[in-house]
Image (tube, rainbow, N blue to C red):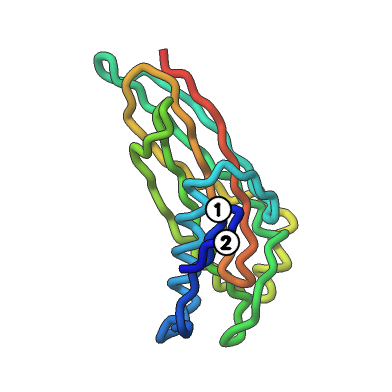
Amino acid sequence: MLVDGKGLSVQARRGYWAPAHEEDAAAAATREIGEAVFSRDEVRDLPSDMRTAVSRGQGTVAELVVTANIDLKLLHFGKADGRNSDDVTVVAAVFDRNGNYLEGKQYLLKLRLRDETLAGLEQRPPETLKSTFNLNPGTYLVRLVVRSGGGGAMTTTSGSVEIP
């Protein structure tokens, strides 16, 4: 350690060691999704949106339904084995008012479409995926992450939900 007359110090080490292996695509996707769930950033790369609805359950517990609508016709499909392919991962997560993670649900939408099916997406409504959470009264933050496997495009959004 070197200390100069201004009270500043410098530390150095000999050498640098890089990780022994590179992260594979699946591990990188898992890491990116996890980081996005716990982030507050809003990203809008994919055509998707989030809706929430609350209904009364038994006693004080309410049911929160998080709906992800994904417009498949605007995804960027890759060609593999004669099919138009993409794997879309959808994660819905709930946090309490202090930002503590409570629960999350993940879905994998494996798309392997023929050319005719892909052309017919123009007439189809968005794909809808629902996640249900049983929660006590309070204020919650809901986080939705949608990630396309082909190219890693992502949409992340958050919303606040009050359960009376």
Residue 7 numbered tag: 1
Question: Which residue shows up at 64% across the image and 44% down it?
Answer: 42
Residue 113 numbered tag: none
| On screen, residue 50 above or below 160 | below
Q: Residue furthest left?
A: 59
- Residue neighbourhood size for the residue with mark 1, other residues' Cα within 10 Å, grouped as few (<14), some (14–19), many (≥20): few
Question: Which residue shows up at 73% across the image and 67% down it?
Answer: 119
Seen from the viewer's position, the closer of residues 2 and 76 is 2
Amino acid type of the residue tagged 2 in the rendering: Asp
Q: Secondary structure at mark 2?
A: loop
Residue 137 figure quarter: top left
| On screen, residue 79 above or below 72 | below
Give me the C-alpha separation between circle 1 and circle 2: 6 Å
Seen from the viewer's position, the closer of residues 77 and 37 is 37
Seen from the viewer's position, the closer of residues 93 and 15 is 15
| On screen, residue 5 above or below 139 | below
- Residue neighbourhood size for the residue with mark 2, other residues' Cα within 10 Å, grouped as few (<14), some (14–19), many (≥20): few
Give the image location of residue 91, x and y in percent.
46, 50
Total marks shown come to 2
Q: Is residue 118 left or right of residue 143?
A: right
Give the image location of residue 33, x and y in percent.
49, 57
Question: Which residue shows up at 64% across the image and 81% down it?
Answer: 79
CB of mark 1 within 8 Å of CB of mark 2? yes
Give the image location of residue 96, x and y in percent.
39, 29
Amino acid type of the residue tagged 1 in the rendering: Gly
Which residue is denoted by mark 2 in the rendering? 4
Q: Is residue 22 left or right of residue 44?
A: left
| On screen, residue 150 above or below 35 | below
Q: Which image quarter is the C terminus in?
A: top left
Question: Which residue shows up at 37% across the image and 26% down it?
Answer: 63
Q: Secondary structure at mark 1?
A: loop
